[in-house]
Amino acid sequence: MSKQYKVILVEDDESLRTLYKEAFTHNNFEVVEAEDGQLGVDYTLQTMPDVIILDLMLPRQGGLSVLRILRSHPDTKNIPIIIMTALPNPEYQDVAKGKVQAYFLKTQVKPQELVDKALELLKDK
C-alpha cells in the first residue's frame, strides 16, 4: 500500500470542497477541510499537512493573507501550496510567485489533475 499523505482543502465553496475531497480520498489522502482562511491557518498549524490547496477568495482571512502567514511560520514555510482561484488576477499571481508550487484557475483544472499535481510535489517526500 502506498504512503498516505494529508491534504488540507482551504475552500469556502462546499460543493468544490466535496468534489476535491472525493478526488483526494479516492487517491489515499487523508483530507482536512477548512471553509475560511482563519480555519485554514489554524488547521494547518494543528495538523501539519503534507500539501495545502488554498483558495484566494475566502471569508475571515483572504488566501494571500493565509499564504503570508504560512510562509512566515517556521513549521509551515516549506509545505507545498497549490493556489486555486476563480479570478485570473495577474496581481495575485505576482504576489504568490515564488511562494507557491502551483497556481490554477478553478475553471481550467479537473480534481484529478489537482491530485496528480499534489502527488508530483510529494513524490520525493
Image (tube, rainbow, N blue to C red):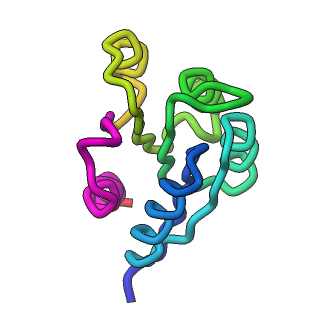
Residue at far top of view: 91
Q: Residue at x 32, y 52 (%)?
A: 121
Residue 110: % across, % down? 27, 56
Q: Is residue 104 magenta?
A: yes
Please state the total of marks drawn on the protein image. 0
| Magenta residues, start to end | 103-123
Residue at far front of view: 15
Q: Residue at x 42, y 14 (%)?
A: 95
Helix, strand or loop for the magenta stretch, by majority: helix
Location of residue 107 with respect to 68 vertically, above or below: below
Residue 115 in which image quadrant: bottom left
Residue 100: % across, % down? 39, 32
- Residue 40 appears in the figure: yes
Location of residue 101 with respect to 120 vertically, above or below: above
Location of residue 79 with respect to 116 vertically, above or below: above
Of the 4 image quadrants, the one containing the C terminus is bottom left
Residue at far bottom of view: 1
Of the 4 image quadrants, the one containing the N terminus is bottom left
Q: Is residue 79 magenta?
A: no
Q: Residue at x 31, y 37 (%)?
A: 104
Residue 83: % across, % down? 41, 36
Question: In the image, is 54 to the left or to the right of 14?
Answer: left
Residue 7: % across, % down? 52, 59
